């Protein structure tokens, strides 16, 4: 085991060579916390004049209530719309129209919830809202942030919302970093919720197109929703149709003002930047922002599952099979063990599932293994498989359990364990080589675990896992009472 740790340390030096010279990652990360709670992580890499900037807010769909499901995803869209100074031709003239749109839209939403609503009144409000939206268009400047960044050499401008986090990212020339600070601090200070009702319709269509009619996403959504009965991980990030349709500007604004604030924010700047200058720059632009309210820990705890859950989802598509087992999350030791089990069972063409189910028995066209749906709270170990015709999901499921039983009864060979451990660490080190990859990992781990050093300690912790640990975890978690099975089938296949 000591030899392995030495080898991995040498590998870290090798992979980090072009970026870190002869220093380890921990020595290169400069961290600073501002008085308002914002955390800044800086890594200097001066090989190219580029900086990757990640802003991660430790708020995601897991923090929503029954009144706000879907709001984190809606806000991801809305925060591209601009501020009081960006995205508008004249905010003073725009503001009263926005207020009137919200007033009419709120009336319409409330009316639609009434079972005895007057259709004529609904029609009149719909017409009034459309007229106001049409009038408002003259003040809207589309794609303002992306256009500014593009004109100044920025690439990869994007955002994503997960169960646990919301992140905005960009890579741009290092001499444009102050432009980034100006834009992003303005977005945190004075965001304007433009086109809320229009964007709600866009998201509902996104849900219809990408979830309701997409076999893979529909199957996954059904799995997660059935595996969790209490914890908010059960809810889709995009929200349900009724959620999206009733997200008001007021609810959205309250969620934004409460949580999208410095106390929940981690910034990583990786690339051609000097740490001292970066700290001064971020302090100058972000330091006077109000701290906000810390995102609360989710109180709802998923009760222990005491029996198998089995669901058949009828859908006109090729059959699919998904099996999920409840498991702990970081920094629990068993979570590290599951990372190795993931590699043993489902990573690449040398994995056990691929060799046995795809190549040898030809029962499946594909088998994938992954953790879901989030990382902040206990989650799921998922096995997702597609049977190869004429084999059935029942045949494939039985074969999967045979492979899981091997893990429960037999020790993994030390050679196999060493190989998958090395591959796991090497894959992570590859991410560290790019500015963007490192910035993402730093902000994610800082937000999720409270300490970005989880990333540094990962290699050591993986090196401690033994073949006995894998067998023990397999026996503890791969039990019928701990699993949820969702099968997607055509109706005529029942």
Image (cartoon, helix red, strand yellow):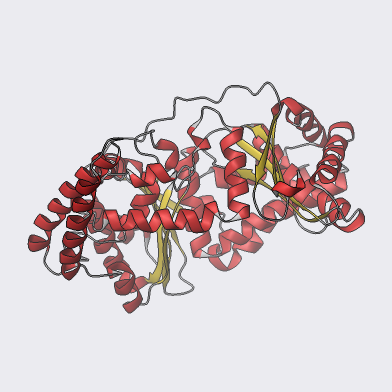
Quarter holding the C terminus is top right
Is 116 situated left or right of 464 in this image?
A: left
Residue 138 position in % (x across, y down): 16, 70
Residue at 17% x, 49% y: name it.
Answer: 104
486 or 35: which is nearer to us?
A: 486
Q: Position of residue 269 (x, y in %)?
A: 40, 59
Between 219 and 436, which is closer to the camera in this rendering? Answer: 219
Query: Is residue 223 among what the camera can see?
Result: yes
Q: Residue at x 11, y 66 (%)?
A: 90
* Left or right: 15 as drawn, with respect to 448: right
Image quarter of residue 143: bottom left
In screen coordinates, is 120 left or right of 448?
left
Residue at 68% in and 42% down: 382
* Front residue of 1 and 385: 385
Query: What number of labels is visible?
Result: 0
Instruction: Name the quadrant containing residue 253.
Output: top left
- Residue 150 image-quadrant placement: bottom left
Q: Which quadrant: the N terminus?
A: top right
Residue placed furthest toward the right: 360
Point out residue 416 in the picture as x, y percentages from the top left corner.
85, 48
Q: Is 48 situated above or below 169?
A: below
Residue 486's spot in the image, x, y percent?
68, 40
Q: Does the rendering let one see residue 59?
A: no
């Amino acid at each position: 085991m000591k030899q392995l740790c030495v080898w991995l340390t040498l590998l870290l030096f090798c992979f980090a060579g072009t970026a870190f010279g002869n220093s380890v990652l921990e020595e290169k990360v400069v961290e600073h916390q501002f008085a308002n709670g914002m955390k800044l992580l800086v890594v200097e890499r001066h090989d190219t004049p580029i900086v990757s900037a990640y802003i991660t807010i430790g708020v995601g769909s897991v923090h929503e209530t029954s009144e706000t499901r879907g709001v984190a995803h809606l806000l991801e869209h809305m925060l591209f719309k601009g501020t009081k100074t960006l995205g508008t031709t004249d905010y003073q003239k725009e503001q009263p129209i926005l207020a009137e749109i919200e007033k009419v839209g709120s009336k319409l939403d409330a009316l639609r919830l009434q079972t005895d609503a007057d259709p004529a009144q609904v029609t009149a409000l719909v017409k009034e809202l459309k007229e106001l939206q049409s009038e408002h268009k003259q003040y809207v400047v589309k794609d303002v942030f992306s256009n500014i960044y593009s004109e100044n050499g920025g690439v990869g401008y994007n955002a994503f919302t997960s169960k646990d986090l919301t992140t905005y990212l960009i890579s741009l020339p290092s001499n444009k970093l102050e432009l980034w600070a100006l834009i992003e601090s303005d977005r945190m200070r004075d965001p304007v919720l433009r086109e809320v009702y229009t964007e709600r319709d866009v998201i509902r269509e996104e849900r219809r197109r990408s979830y309701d009619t997409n076999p893979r996403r529909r199957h996954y959504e059904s799995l997660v929703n059935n595996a969790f009965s209490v914890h908010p991980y059960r809810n889709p990030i995009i929200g349900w149709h009724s959620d999206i349709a009733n997200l008001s500007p007021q609810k959205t604004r309250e969620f934004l003002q409460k949580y999208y604030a410095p106390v929940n924010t981690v910034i990583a700047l990786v690339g051609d930047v000097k740490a001292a200058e970066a700290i001064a720059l971020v302090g100058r632009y972000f330091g006077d922002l109000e701290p906000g309210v810390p995102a609360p820990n989710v109180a709802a705890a998923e009760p222990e599952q005491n029996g198998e859950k089995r669901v058949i989802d009828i859908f006109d598509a090729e059959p699919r099979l998904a099996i999920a087992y409840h498991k702990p999350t970081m920094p629990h030791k068993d979570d590290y063990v599951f990372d190795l089990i993931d590699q043993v069972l489902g990573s690449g063409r040398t994995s056990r599932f691929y060799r046995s189910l795809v190549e040898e028995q030809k029962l499946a066209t594909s088998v994938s293994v992954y953790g879901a749906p989030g990382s902040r709270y206990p989650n799921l170990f998922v096995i997702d498989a597609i049977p190869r015709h004429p084999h059935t999901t029942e045949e494939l499921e039985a074969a999967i359990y045979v492979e899981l039983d091997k893990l429960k009864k037999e020790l993994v060979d030390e050679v196999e364990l060493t190989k998958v451990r090395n591959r796991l660490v090497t894959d992570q080190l590859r991410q560290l080589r790019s500015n963007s990859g490192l910035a993402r990992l730093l902000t994610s781990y800082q937000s999720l675990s409270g300490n970005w050093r989880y990333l540094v300690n990962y290699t050591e912790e993986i090196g401690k896992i033994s073949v006995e640990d894998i067998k023990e975890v397999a026996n503890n978690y791969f039990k019928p009472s701990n699993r949820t099975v969702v099968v997607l089938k055509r109706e005529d296949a029942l």
